[in-house]
Amino acid sequence: MTGRLLLVIALLLGGFWGTASAQEKPPVRLRLSSLSVRNRSCAPIAVQVKLEYNDPKILEGDLELYLYDALDIVSPEDMLASMKYEGIVLSGSDYIFHTILPPVPTSTLQNLAVQAWFRTKDGNRIPLSSSLKDISPPKPHDLLMISPLERATTICSCRASTTAGQSSANREFLEKSLSLENYNPAFRAEGTVETVAGGRSPQLMGRHIQYYPVDWASRDLPSNPLMLCAFDMVLFSDGGLGALSAEQLDAVLAWVQAGGSACFVADSPLKGYHLNMIQTVFQGPQSNQQFVLDDSGRLMVLTGEQPQARFQHFGLGRMVLLRAEEDWSKTLPPETMGLLNGFLWKVRMDSPIHSGQKWSSPGIEDLLTSKGVPWEKNDAGNYNIKNHYNGRQYFAEAFNLTPEQLRETYTLETQLAPLTESLVSTASVGLMPEDVEMVPTWVIALILAAYVTVIGPVDYVVLGWFRLRKFTWIAFPVVTAAFTAFTIWIAHVYMGSTETGGSIEIVDVVEDGKAIRQTRLEMLFYGSRTTHKSSHRNEISVAVADVMSPADYLRGNYRMDNPVRASGTPKLGFVGRFPDNYTISQTVQQWSPQMMRTTAILPEGVQVPQLDWNDATLVSTAGGRVRLSQTIMKLGTGSGEAAAFSVPSVRAWVLHKEKLYDLSRNPEQSMPGVQPAVMTNSYMYSDPYSSGMYGMNMKDALLHCFLDSTVATKRNSFMSIVSQVSPEGSAQLEDLPFLDSTDPRQWALVIVVPEQNVYRVYRKLYIVEPQGDGEMSDE
């Protein structure tokens, strides 16, 4: 009996050690963590990568990450992208770096599962599991994501200290106060959002702004401005400004010029390059302020006023310099915080936020009109709805609806979730190769009729004539194969192309004609299944696919138990160091158009038209616009591809408030401003409440969208609160608009130069201060 017991124990121990051996602890372990509680909407994901390695032997290899839109990896269809970081050398210590993951579209699961491996130089794959209990295959690392039905904002709060958790009361006050959610009418005093029993109802989805401050040491701030696209704003306090290196400061300035926002607190000793930045940005040639450093390196103002905050437009972005004080909670009143938030968040100038008030919700009738709902008010004070189709949505007839019923039926509350610019849908059609067309219906019908005729009467009569009907079983597959081959050949004739599609290059220009940001949309269309590869340096490149909007969710296309995923999202393979230097590999299916968006800050090798970009009178005065029109028209040659356009080869406009000046036709006379538009059936339709531009051809539709993507025209959305968002590089193109049509100081110049298969768009924002009589130029 004792022998049997010992045998059982031995077997159990053997099984245990066998299992332990099979699950041997790998020599490398990965710690992957997001740098914020949730990511910013439509933006790259800031993460920290930590590879733990304690062996003194040098280990070289590549880090492989596979990104899945899932809670648990159950299907390869859930994979969004793969990334390979090459040339990693581990030598007996932890390998830590901050990076960003591309802005991939995720579903309402709000989770990104990342499966990781370390591939050594000799080809061995070391699983990097998030749990030592599940090593092979490695258990994925979970990153919490924001739902596409919600709006999330992040602020990068930088400090001098390298110890996390150390924060002054002033810094905590700023982090809490620099939030747009403080001005949300649905935001309660105790800091919660209206909810209903059982959670947030569909009517409340997307009605608030989630806000996440990210605590960083200035030492860890990247020197590549594209890395800052993970944030809406950067804040430097608790000595954060003084701890910045010159290279890091240049990256921040480039990102701000490209449309970002930065708040600097001069509360610590500074160096010469910090002072040079402050003098360049905030002092100005006409300012009576003179900034210097005292013997300890502290910022001083020798002459002029010393306000609490100095506000400055810088390129497309905004910068604020705050004076160091002991307790901002006592010295920064709500009115000043309203100005601070309104400026840094690029809030529309007509918003009550600038005076410290909550933003105003539109009335029920304004909401109905903005939604395109045909309504009339009856004698009882309620509303009747007429039968109507606006090119996108059908409205059934209804009577005597109360305002509460209208809000619930038509989801009229402001929806703050990200929306996609109309340029995406227009470009997806307008950039297709011109020699590609669908097979006409009459051709398909003719082939079908011929096929039926051949396999029916012809087969019966001909084989019967020769007394060979027994060969029908051979004739039928032969005829079918012949017609199939003929149909494929016809499809190649119509849909085949020697080109892969066109592209759009939008270049944003700042002072001295410097190209600060480039956005490129490129169509990929192939006549056969192809693996497309492209190299990128200091660029964010993502696939542009249809993205679900909150309106789709609220119309019933979404259920809580049925997660919504982005449709048609291609799987991209990133090899290299994203976004510094990498290659993208993707499979493009036959006749399946695919569009890519690439974003660059301080793009290399970009040429801009030879204009006096610093002269604001060229856009703000009638005489200046005439001179500018004459200069711009010389850019066009009127030959080649441009000659085929129904408009002059070069088009140019000036946008200001609700006015539009066409420099190509009549630069002195203004027209109504840009109206929001949508794409339907390969034509551009304006919303029913706009001036109406129906049946517009595709080339004119693209020109319209270039204007539409310059000024924020979306009503009842986040872009009805702000006029601009910081650079993000996502597929929605939400960061393209920059003009505030409610600010009389802002003017925008848009130049479109069509070339063969390429639209080159040049844009510049001008800030024109009031003249002596208080008026804005010639307006």
Image (tube, grey):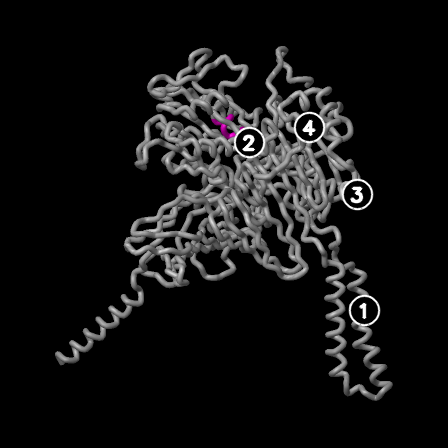
Label 3 or label 1, whichever comes before in sequence order = 1
Label 2 or label 1, whichever comes before in sequence order = 1
Q: Amino acid at mark 3?
A: Ala
Q: Are marks 2 and 1 in contact (CB under 8 Å)?
A: no
Label 4 or label 1, whichever comes before in sequence order = 1
Residue range corresponding to the magenta coloring: 341-347
Residue 580 colored magenta?
Answer: no
The image position of residue 260, as x and y in percent, is 51, 33
The image position of residue 477, as x and y in percent, is 73, 78
Residue extending farthest to the right is 465
**Foreground: disc 3 or disc 4:** 3
**Foreground: disc 4 or disc 2:** 4
In the image, residue 543 sits, relative to residue 336, either above or below, namely: below
Q: Which mark is residue 203?
A: none
The image position of residue 488, as x and y in percent, is 72, 66
- Look at mark 3 in the image and give the residue it sits on: 644
- Look at mark 1 in the image and give the residue it sits on: 449
Q: Amino acid at mark 1?
A: Ala
Tell me the quarter of the image containing the C terminus.
top right
**Foreground: disc 3 or disc 2:** 3
The answer to whether one can see residue 382 in this image is no
**Distance in Å between CA atoms under marks 4 and 2:** 21 Å
In the image, residue 263 sits, relative to residue 222, either above or below, namely: above
Q: Residue at x 42, y 12 (%)?
A: 302
Total numbered circles? 4
